[in-house]
Amino acid sequence: MSQAISVRLDDEAVRALTKLEATGLTRSEAIRLALVGAAARLNDKGSLAREVAALETDESDRTEMLAVADLMERLRAPR
């Protein structure tokens, strides 16, 4: 059985909903998909560990991370 609800969306949520709708989903489909997906991720205890492991093997991400760290170090005030 379907249940209608009312929500207030902040600017970030509106932008996210707009992106989902741009894929061809209806507003209701996009919201249902996002809710079910968020709940599934909460239930998947290993998902964060897998995401971290994937990022650790992503060479472009690691290169960018090191470049940002280097930039931050160079911008740091002298001691």
Image: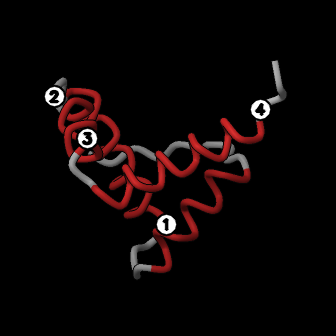
Residue occupying image coordinates x 18% and y 24%:
45
Between marks 4 and 3 in the image, the one whose residue lies nearer the viewer: 4
Question: Which dot marks residue 51?
Answer: 3
Circle 1 crowding by C-alpha within 10 Å: few under 14, some 14–19, many from 20:
some
- Distance, label 4 to label 3, CA atoms, is 30 Å
Secondary-structure class at tag 2: loop
> Of label 4 and label 2, which has the lower sequence position?
2
Q: Position of residue 4 (x, y in %)?
A: 47, 47
> Of label 2 and label 3, which has the lower sequence position?
2
- Distance, label 1 to label 4, CA atoms, is 46 Å
Residue occupying image coordinates x 29% and y 57%:
59
Q: Which residue is mark 2?
A: 46
Between marks 2 and 3 in the image, the one whose residue lies nearer the viewer: 3
Secondary-structure class at tag 1: helix
Q: Position of residue 68 (x, y in %)?
A: 58, 47
Query: Residue 31 falls in which quadrant of the image?
Result: bottom left
Instruction: Determine the residue located farthest toward the front in the rendered image.
Output: 79
> Of label 4 and label 3, which has the lower sequence position?
3
Question: Which dot marks residue 11?
Answer: none
Q: Are marks 1 and 4 in contact (CB under 8 Å)?
A: no
Question: Which dot marks residue 76?
Answer: 4
Q: Are marks 4 and 2 in contact (CB under 8 Å)?
A: no
Q: Which residue is mark 1?
A: 27
Circle 2 crowding by C-alpha within 10 Å: few under 14, some 14–19, many from 20:
few
